[in-house]
Amino acid sequence: MDLTVNIAGVKFPSCFMNASGALCVTREELWTLGRSHAGAVVTKSMTVESRQGNPLPRYVGFPGGSINSMGLPNLGYKAYAELIPELKQFGKPVIASIAGLCEDDFPTIAQVINEAKPDLIEVNLSCPNIPGKPQIGYDAEASERLMKRVRKVITVPMGVKLPPYFDPAHHKLMGDVIGRCGVDFLNLINSVGNGLVVDPETESVVIKPKGGFGGLGGTIIKPVALANVRAFWKYFNGTMPIIGTGGVSNGVDAFEHILCGASAVQVGTVLVEEGVQVFTRLEQELSACLEKKGYKSVLECRGKLKEL
Ligand code: DHB
């Protein structure tokens, strides 16, 4: 089975990779991804300064998903700029995820990271967990301003990681904006922001930051992720490469993302729960699923979702 894919002209040995945030903060974690069956190494979203992140507990898995409010723990962009060249030795693409605590941080980070030559750069417009900082991706004007600024300094393929949208009017609005900004690929979706998980036994929230509010991931968000992949695939008439993220925990989940238009698939919650061994399982399961359906490759079924 051919699970190799191409995104914005970059070849991936497998369509599965880590979602930014999952086991990708430290050098050791990134090397572990490099040595695994993951089709790429995606870094944690990086900020200007290194950060410890929010107080613990800040990630909790539960049946059907997870909630997190990590608070951008990361080594700072200068450390990742040094790590990127060594990560490229694993023979798979390196995707640098960049974030910022204010708009001016993004071009600062983008310039230096671009010089380190990751294979692709993902601009994160959708971190929901910094107290007092709304997600940029829910502000179309700020998103456009920011994407145009970073595009000027990024020479490798540039993607944007978006939050979920819940209304076709928002898909159109952001599709129009993205179409004006020279974006090479989309990553859909980030966690579903500011959910609340309650433990009835302890009568308490389950994570400490922000009074228990945090980003939801895992199986429970799959229909939201699929809807966003499909909506943007259709908006761009199948011409915009999409990484599908959200609710993938087995090969069939990945197949569903691919049918909706995803070229590749990222895993967050299931990677945190199972570790990097998950990539071999996902490859086997997707291969078996495609084989059963009579497909020979990921590309052959991408976007081929039927409507009634
Ligand atoms: C964090 C969470 C996100 O969903 C994201 O996109 C970036 C950072 C975090 O809390 O660390």
Image (tube, rainbow, N blue to C red):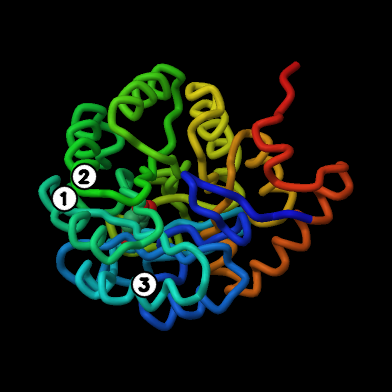
Asked if the residue under mark 3 is in contact with the one under mark 1, i.e. CB atoms within 8 Å, the reply is no
Q: Earlier in the sequence, mark 1 or mark 3?
A: 3
Mark 3 surroundings within 10 Å by alpha-carbon count, few (fewer than 14), some (14 through 19), many (20 or more): many
Query: In the image, 301: left or right of 243?
Result: right
The residue closer to the viewer here, 126 or 65, is 126
**Residue 32 showing in the rendered view:** yes
Q: Which residue is mark 1?
A: 107
Q: Which corner quadrant of the image does residue 87 belong to? A: bottom left
Q: Is mark 2 within 8 Å of ligand 1?
A: no
Q: Which residue is mark 3?
A: 25
The residue closer to the viewer here, 63 or 99, is 99
**As drawn, 78 above or below 238:** below
Residue lying furthest bottom: 28
Mark 1 surroundings within 10 Å by alpha-carbon count, few (fewer than 14), some (14 through 19), many (20 or more): many
Residue type at mark 1 is Pro
Asked if the residue under mark 2 is in contact with the one under mark 1, i.e. CB atoms within 8 Å, the reply is yes
Q: Which residue is mark 2?
A: 150
Q: In which quadrant of the rendered image does the N terminus lie?
A: bottom right
Closer to the eye: label 1 or 3: 1
Q: Is mark 1 within 8 Å of ligand 1?
A: no
